[in-house]
Amino acid sequence: KNKNNMKKNNINSQSIVNENSTKHKSNKSRTKKIEYEPHADLATCLERYTSGDPTILRGKLRVMPARNGAAFVTCDRGSFSRDVVIKDEKCRNRALDGDYVYVELMPLDGVGGGDDDDTSGYENGGDNVRKEITIDEFMENLKLDDGSNRPSAAAESTNKKTNDIDDEIGMNVDFEEEEYLIEDDVAIEGKTEPHGKNSDEVEEEVEMWHDDDAQMSLWDPVVNLRKKPKRSSKSQDNDSVVQRSGKVIFIIPPKSNVGKLPSELNPSSEDYRKEFSTRTIVGTLTKLPDGKRYLLVPNNKSLPRFMCPQGTNEENSENGSGEDGNGSAKALYRAIYTYGSWHATNKWPPCKNLTPLCGSCNVEDETKALLVEFDVDHGDFPPKVLKDVEQSVKSGRFYEKSGSSSEEDMGWKPTEEMLRGRRDYRNHRVFTIDPTTARDLDDALHITPLPDGRVEIGVHIADVSHFIQPDTAVDEEALRRATTVYLVDRVIPMLPRPLCEIACSLNENVERLAFSVVWRMNMDGTLSKKGEKEKCKKDEIWYGRTVIKSCSRLDYATAQNIIDGKVATGEKVVDETLWPKSRQPTGGHTFDEVAADVRLMHKVAMALRKL
């Protein structure tokens, strides 16, 4: 008995050792770290790009919102008819969604794809080649599960637990791409060409902008670029233009270094090295299995998870409706990612300056997080900015009572001195067309029929440069904000209200300073030449500073009603549901006159589209 027990114990011990050994080997293989390739030098990328190297392109990276999902880059020169595929995180090479990158195309013979890329079969049409299929074909091949092959609850629980652990500890799991999204490269005599055509036939089909007489007549393009061919739905089904794949070799630092990076104009600049670009990340925290470190899980699912600094502690917010199961919502955190800090041997990019931002699961907190994530949480304008604005508008400012209210509203009118040297369009029928909720009306239009059958068209932009001088505090603030941001429930303005909503807004029935372009067109949509009968090639276009007085504040719905003939068709009383009273003409102009101008513009626009 003792001998038999000893044998059983030895067998059990050996089986446990073997099991542990197998687990150790499995874990060892699953925890293989990703080693990214070193980035190329920016000067080298610029040199290759400007010299016309066909194996490099530049563009914005778009990552699919899935774990290790594929990414795509559109060439900013339009050299490729299809996006270039960046197939996995190793090929993305530490680039984030939204980054501008230099991409090197994978060789057609599969050489140079990296140790784990398996590009030999992927690129050269071997057994592993992935063909692009249509949605109809995909749905036909899709087999619905009736539940007979569904794993047991215990198996599902085990698989879920394993996947969750993989998520938390960052094991190098190989994820399948969705095959119907990617089509592979095919080499035809060393070139990527449509099947069934040789290089000579393809070359004959290339059309340049200078070959198009209509385009030359319209705006005479200076650079003779190749036109992108129009592809019908039928030709797309049979089109065999391949979709190339590539890998990121350099990440262009974002806007914090604008104007300091080496460029075609200043290739030797080194100012960008003095400043590190950053990006704001907003998300929630998740704890790693070791219980010591945290990962920041971004709200933007196209971004990877970020490793939090040592000593991070999770906090919960009492706002919200309880995502953590305890009646309280998980707190949202704000962190900073510094470009260049993600080393080649790190699974996750590091973040710093991690601070609690707000709660979640309520409109106010989620809106705040959204503004922070996209760097538009500008807050109030600084006092020095408001001081600059006060100086710029005070000469033409006045106050007047609004209706029955005792409060006075601010108004603005140009002085006689401001009008000197400007072309006067105050007596022209100028009007604006903007979204219904727009506050700052920055462009206006006019159209005038001419006796010879042509039309004069004018576009008038608010002359903001009259009020903002270069390098002032308000100029720097406008540069930082870049644009007015419209949300569902609020507006974040680019300029203080005295400028964006009053002095620089082309409101109806008030005089405003503008910068205008005025030109003449034929009714067939072509641009009229000056002295056309004398065959003069100079365009009849005028640019300059003007003063205007808009007569009507139209919105898109009203303009569409006019075009559709639902309103202003000769009736004496206009239906205010189709043309609201607040948007009706002022200054002596009539409904029929403004409606005729809108319809005339539409007629010329439709003729232009047919060219």
Image (tube, grey):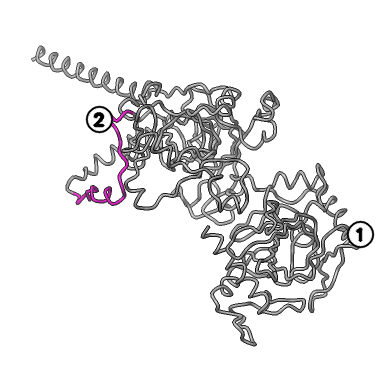
Determine the residue located farthest toward the left in the rendered image: 1
The x, y position of residue 496, in whole percent, is 76, 55
Q: Is residue 334 above or below residue 288?
A: below
The x, y position of residue 23, in whole percent, is 28, 23
On the image, which quarter does residue 498 sit in?
Answer: bottom right
Q: Amino acid at mark 2?
A: Asp
Residue at 67 percent of width and 66 percent of height: 455
Q: Nearer the viewer, residue 24 or 382?
A: 382
Q: Is residue 42 above or below residue 607?
A: above
The x, y position of residue 527, in whole percent, is 63, 57
Question: Which residue has dot 2 on it?
Answer: 127
Tell me the quarter of the image containing the N terminus: top left
Q: Which mark is residue 417?
A: 1
Q: Nearer the viewer, residue 596 or 14?
A: 596
Magenta: predominant secondary structure element? loop
Q: Which residues are the magenta region?
A: 124-147
Q: Is residue 424 above or below residue 183?
A: below
Q: Is residue 368 magenta?
A: no
Q: Is residue 366 visible?
A: no
Determine the residue located farthest toward the top in the rendered image: 3
Q: Is residue 141 magenta?
A: yes
Q: Nearer the viewer, residue 480 or 47?
A: 47
Residue at 60 percent of width and 59 percent of height: 526
Residue at 74 percent of width and 68 percent of height: 550
Residue 72 relative to residue 29: left or right: right
Determine the residue located farthest toward the right in the rendered image: 417
Q: Is residue 87 above or below residue 21?
A: below
